[in-house]
Image (cartoon, helix red, strand yellow):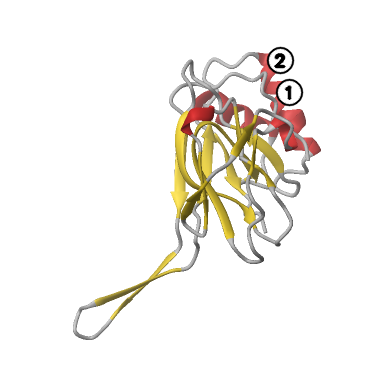
Amino acid sequence: MEIFPESVLYSFPMAIDEEWRTLISDAESGKEQRRKCWAFPKRGAGLNHKCVKLEEFKTVWKFYHERCGAHEKFYFIFPNFGGSGDYWYGEYLGQGDGSETTFDLRSKDTNASSVTVYVDGTPVSHTFISGGGQAGMDRVQISAPSEGEIVTADFQGRLVLDARFLQDKLTKELFNALMFNAQVPVIEVKRT
């Protein structure tokens, strides 16, 4: 999978939204019943590039074209706006199979002291590994979780998403206008 061009500069702040997919039913009494459909949010990001240079526009347009619009997913790495990255909580790392011990942290430039790893919600000891994962992600090593156990983590760093472009049909002129005046939206692709 390709990485969204990190050479393209973003305007700060970047718009990030989360969708949790909650089903809400109203009873005749007026009481609500809510059911969470997803264990983890699906995020979107608006790539805001005000004052983008022509070469940067060409780079992103070419990347969009090579991905065939919304068809092909890519790694989107959140920019670092001069700090240590944002805090991210309960990020899904994977599911235990009884033998796997190393998991990509879904982050780059991670503050190693900020990392807490959980197996089925219980904190576990881990070893932090800088880099080495897909798209240069940092990694953690833990005792092999049993089959079906969910591995999550809290950390501070630059989040790495499996993403795709939200829109599949854009003219070059509209893409240009979105980059200069609004946002080119990308959306997270759920990992299995």
For the residue labelled by badge 1, is the local secondary structure a helix, a strand or a loop?
helix
Q: Report x, y in % for residue 47.
A: 55, 31
- The one nearer the camera, 187 or 107, is 107
CA separation, marks 1 and 2?
6 Å
For the residue labelled by badge 2, is the local secondary structure a helix, a strand or a loop?
helix
Tags 1 and 2 in contact by the CB under 8 Å rule? yes
Q: Report x, y in % for residue 17.
A: 45, 44
Q: Residue at x 73, y 23 (%)?
A: 59
Q: Is residue 8 left or right of residue 181?
A: right
Within-10-Å neighbours for mark 2: few <14, some 14–19, many 20+:
few
The residue at which mark 1 appears reads as: 59
Q: Residue at x 56, y 25 (%)?
A: 79
Q: Report x, y in % for residue 108.
A: 61, 29
- The one nearer the camera, 28 or 168, is 28
Residue type indicated by callout 1: Thr
Numbered circle sitting on residue 55: 2
